Image (cartoon, rainbow, N blue to C red):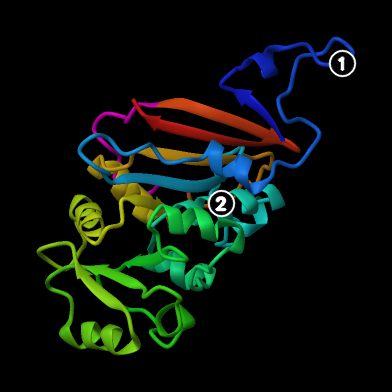
Amino acid sequence: MRRLFPVTDETAAPAPGGGPGEEGAGREWDLAELAAAYAYPEPGAGGPLPWLRANMVSTLDGAAQHDGRSQPISSATDMRIFGTLRALADVVVVGAETVRQEGYRPARARAEFAATREAAGQAPAPAIAVVSASLDLDFSLPLFTSPLVPTLVLTGAAAAPDRVATAEKAGARVVTAGDGIGVDPARAVQALAGLGHTRLLTEGGPRLLGQLVAAGVLDELCLTVSPMLSAGDAQRIAGGPAVTVPRRFSLLSMLEEDGFLFTRYGRS
């Protein structure tokens, strides 16, 4: 792993043999280093504010999936960063379709992050928050019946009462974040913050990410650029209607390993 941006004294210094410096090159970064590289912003004087980051992977030609799943275009290091981002978050927000396609399971406690999470006042593992208008979910899955932290279901006020009851019977906590059938992204962020979840992470899918982008509530994008080409008609990382004016983000950091680029972009 090596850091390409921001440039520091270490990255700029000549490497042995006269080549450019590469901070951390030639070795695997430990989890503490990854956690520092992806730390959430420090709370301001008025206390913590919600910060929503997305974590996605894309091929060189823009595909967010292969055969409907992101795993084939990922890597071992990408998965270590995936786990680190989860370990830093209070809650992981995910769309219902991604839960169905990716076989989501409850987030697990990581011994390596136990002390850090306890010091930060966090639960042993992040909660999973599933965004679903229809509540057409299999509530017999471990995600709902046996999570370490109760799974949340974000839905609208007009959700079918019988589906709400089924979710709650399975052990999920149903959170209303919209006046109609669907979920309002801004209300979802505020509802989660009201539950004490201010370090927010979304892992998509593309439809949900598109809604968050359109609503202007996304603060940060952690994008892994996979050195692969897939062609075909796979989804991009964000779907849905286009925004009127493209949202501008600034590059915060970039790491590289084995041709994979691990980038962070923040709202400008």
Amino acid at circle 1: Pro
Q: Which residue is mark 1?
A: 16
Q: Nearer the viewer, residue 259 or 152?
A: 152
The mark total stands at: 2
Residue at (36% x, 73% y) in the render = 151
User: Of label 2 and label 1, which has the lower sequence position?
Assistant: 1
SS for callout 1: loop
SS for callout 2: helix
Q: Nearer the viewer, residue 52 or 261?
A: 52
Which quarter of the rendering shows the N terminus?
top right
Q: Is residue 53 visible?
A: yes
Residue at (29% x, 90% y) in the render = 169
Q: From the viewer's perspective, is 267 left or right of 163?
A: right
Residue 230 picture location, percent across and down: 65, 47
Q: Residue furthest right?
A: 17
Amino acid at circle 2: Thr
The question of residue 264 being in magenta is answered with no
Q: From the viewer's perspective, is 8 left or right of 45?
A: right
Q: From the viewer's perspective, is 115 left or right of 71?
A: left
Please say if 47 is above or below 101. Answer: above
Q: Residues within 10 Å of mark 1 (few under 14, many from 20)?
A: few
Q: Which residues are magenta?
A: 236-249
Q: Is residue 237 visible?
A: no
Please say if 263 is above or below 21. Answer: below
Question: Of the numbered discs in the image, which one, if any, rests on residue 84?
Answer: 2
Identify the image quadrant of residue 145.
Answer: bottom left
Residue 22 picture location, percent across and down: 73, 23
